[in-house]
């Protein structure tokens, strides 16, 4: 839920895509619901990542020094770094619990 919430937060509050903040906790009570919430938030982020004009634009994230503007490229890097960080944490914890997470990218979905 944290990953989906962070995606939505940045798109709603920094980029201002007009879609607001969905309540991911309400949508993720089941495994199917969590998959749906992750997929929807990924699709939202993917719309941003695949639009060159949005990546080239300047943004003013909330709680940021008004003199500091961020480009869409900076936001994209930040979002993807955040995802990698948490996916690595999840993989690490699953391994510690004795699970064997998938190792090939063809076995992993982004949403």
Image (tube, rainbow, N blue to C red):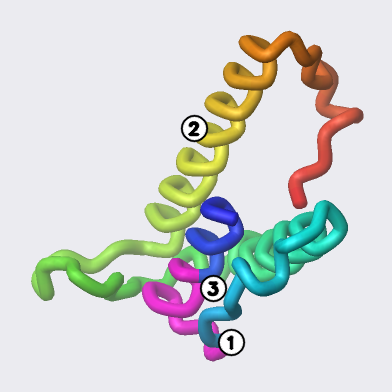
Q: Residue at x 44, y 75 (%)?
A: 15
Q: Quadrant of residue 108?
A: top right
User: Horizontal and vertical percent for residue 11?
Assistant: 50, 72
User: Horizontal and vertical percent for residue 9?
Assistant: 46, 69
Instruction: Farthest residue to the right: give it.
Output: 106
Q: Residue at x 52, y 53 (%)?
A: 2
Marks 3 and 1: which is nearer the front? Answer: 1
Question: Alpha-carbon distance for marks 2 and 3?
Answer: 27 Å
Quadrant housing the N terminus: bottom right
Marks 2 and 3: which is nearer the front? Answer: 2
Q: Which residues are magenta?
A: 9-19
As drawn, the label of residue 19 is: 1
Question: Which residue is labeled 2 in the image?
Answer: 85
Task: Establish if 43 lies above or below 105.
Answer: below
Task: Establish if 3 lies above or below 89.
Answer: below
| Front residue (pair 95, 20) | 95
* Mark 2: few/some/many CA within 10 Å (<14, 14-19, 20+): few
Q: Quadrant of residue 65?
A: bottom left
Question: Alpha-carbon distance for marks 3 and 1?
Answer: 18 Å
Q: Quadrant of residue 90?
A: top right
Q: Residue at x 53, y 35 (%)?
A: 86
| Front residue (pair 83, 98) | 98
Query: Is 99 in the magenta?
Result: no
């Amino acid at each position: 839920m944290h990953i989906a919430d962070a995606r939505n937060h940045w798109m709603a509050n920094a980029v201002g895509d007009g879609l607001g903040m969905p309540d991911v906790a309400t949508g993720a009570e089941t495994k199917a619901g969590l998959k749906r919430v992750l997929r929807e938030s990924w699709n939202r982020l993917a719309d941003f990542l695949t639009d060159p004009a949005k990546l080239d634009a300047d943004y003013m994230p909330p709680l940021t020094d008004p003199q500091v503007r961020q480009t869409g490229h900076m936001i994209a890097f930040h979002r993807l770094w955040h995802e990698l960080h948490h996916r690595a944490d999840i993989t690490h914890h699953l391994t510690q619990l004795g699970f064997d997470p998938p190792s090939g990218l063809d076995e992993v979905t982004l949403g």
